[in-house]
Image: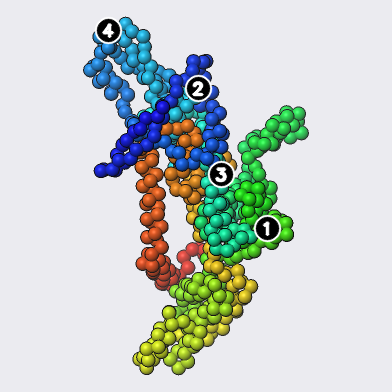
Amino acid sequence: MSEKKVYASHKGSKISYQTRRRSNVTKRRPLNRYEAEEDSAGVNASAKKLKVDTDDIDIQSEFGYRIINFFAVFSAISECVKCKTCNSDIRFLESGTRGLGFKITVCCPNCPKVEIPSCPFIRNGYEINRRIVLTMRLLGVGLAGILKFCAFMELPRPIFQSCYDRAVNIIFIATKGVRDCSMKKAAEDEKKESEAKGLHTGITVSGDGSWRKRGFSSLFGITSLIGWFTGKIVDIEVKSKYCKACEHWKNKLDTTEYEEWLETHADQCQSNHEGSSGKMEVDAVIEMFQRSEALHGLKYANYIGDGDSKTFKGILDAKPYENFEVSQKECIDHVQKRMGTRLRNLRKKTKNLGGKGKLTIKLIDQLTIYYDLAIRRNSNSLENMRNEIWATLLHKMSTDENPQHEKCSESWCEWKKAQATGSLDSFHHKPALSNEVFEAIRPIYEDLSRDELLNRCLGGYTQNSNESFNSTVWHLAPKNYSSGKKILQIASDIAVCNFNDGLINVLRIMKVMDMNIGPQSYNFCLEADATRIQRAERSLTDAAKEARSSIKASRKENEEEFSNLEGQLYGAGIAD
């Protein structure tokens, strides 16, 4: 029967939680140190229960760990206490050490020894050993990092490689269970939001891939699909071109031993991609589209892509849904980048086009921002979008003698505002864009204002959420540390849980792993999630956006001034 515990989470406030008592372990042959840390029998069952038990997180108010100097503390205690039975002096010894877990042995010369475990057991394995592997995994640290941490903290050697691998396997099962639950709920929420907006054929998702290394030479990659209205992950796929076991056995091909090994290895192989690394995103998105109906009971009707890969063509060729064609939407951030990239390339290739009074870096940034704003402000009208794109360019061409503001909007055009207030006589234009620059950039504007392209920009869709998620994954599995597919999968699953529902989902992972949850971890999750919301709200304010744009423009302007002053200082063969 549970007891009701109360503890103060903050000064002046009290919160009550349900705690549970563990039943006594039945007597049986004790497991050895390897078996004890390996037992994961309850993890799969708990992961399945999570479907109906996602909000039941028990907080044990009296649970917590402390770091102490064992010999100093217990030597002092032994000087202060005596045996309650025979009044003899007692000693405290350390025994039963397995990793960071141990037993405190109370020794009396006349009475039987008493052993007190340093932490709870999870099926005869010390809980602390699971806890440190999970905690370090949240920091992006593996076994080598754990060993270094324990060594310099003067803690015992935590666990060996075999025990670490077993703990990782338990974490893998637990995180997958919580992730599946989170994605299922995210898909249900996205479906409700879509239907509320009158979209009944399916949901709109944005997709993006990320690799461990640049240059499309990476052995590992991740791809995510995010619901547009909720901004939550509905599916994810981790791709790998490498398997350590396959690498070990490749020198024994065409042998009987290899054939026997291959039969049992097929389901455990860590490699799930053949082909170039760049094709990982295409294959992953196709696979996720093909399983959407089985996984969530819905179709991905619209796909938001960046136009940088052949992903959408792959979706059309795969035909994931019978008698239903997926529609493409363009990420307007990437469309904006095309304008900036093409203008910068034009400046480099065309002699005498750059420099003061011509196509400067500052002017390129301005034109790129104006192009982006024209799309965002008119995301519901293709005609208005096209008109404002050209309006921004003609606006820069205007002079006092030849004003070209017919298509400008009074909301941003100072000439229009002056016209409305009858103060044109005192209005003077800034130096205009030269005809030379205008004729040079006109083809770029014509190409990037095509109806075909702008039609895909209707709705103002972006992939910002996907890029934010990618960053979350690589914080949990840093690119500068080597790790396999399983570690990357764990990092991706934890990232999904955190991204969709907040850090509080880590407590659900701990629950699936049968770990105790104390007030410190609970309060930290609440505070971290609250801080995350506050930062997001602050970053969306007009003042914050303007400050970021101003700082970015100032840095680029300073960099251009230094480059013009110093000349080229770095390049292939420049010192010859």
| Dot 2 or dot 3, earlier in sequence | 2
Of marks 1 and 2, the one in the foreground: 1
Of marks 3 and 1, the one in the foreground: 3
Cα–Cα gap, marks 2 and 3: 32 Å
Tell me the residue that label 1 is attached to. 315
Tell me the residue that label 2 is attached to. 33
Q: Amino acid at mark 4?
A: Cys
Cα–Cα gap, marks 4 and 1: 80 Å
Cα–Cα gap, marks 2 and 4: 35 Å
Quarter occupied by residue 556: bottom left
Tell me the residue that label 4 is attached to. 86
**Residue 57 percent across, percent down from the top left:** 43, 38
Which residue shows up at 23% across the image and 17% down it?
A: 80
Q: Amino acid at mark 2?
A: Arg
Quarter occupied by residue 87: top left
**Residue 411 percent across, percent down from the top left:** 43, 79
Residue 214 is at least partly visible in this image: no
Tell me the residue that label 3 is attached to. 180
Q: Amino acid at mark 1?
A: Ile
Residue 289 is at least partly visible in this image: yes
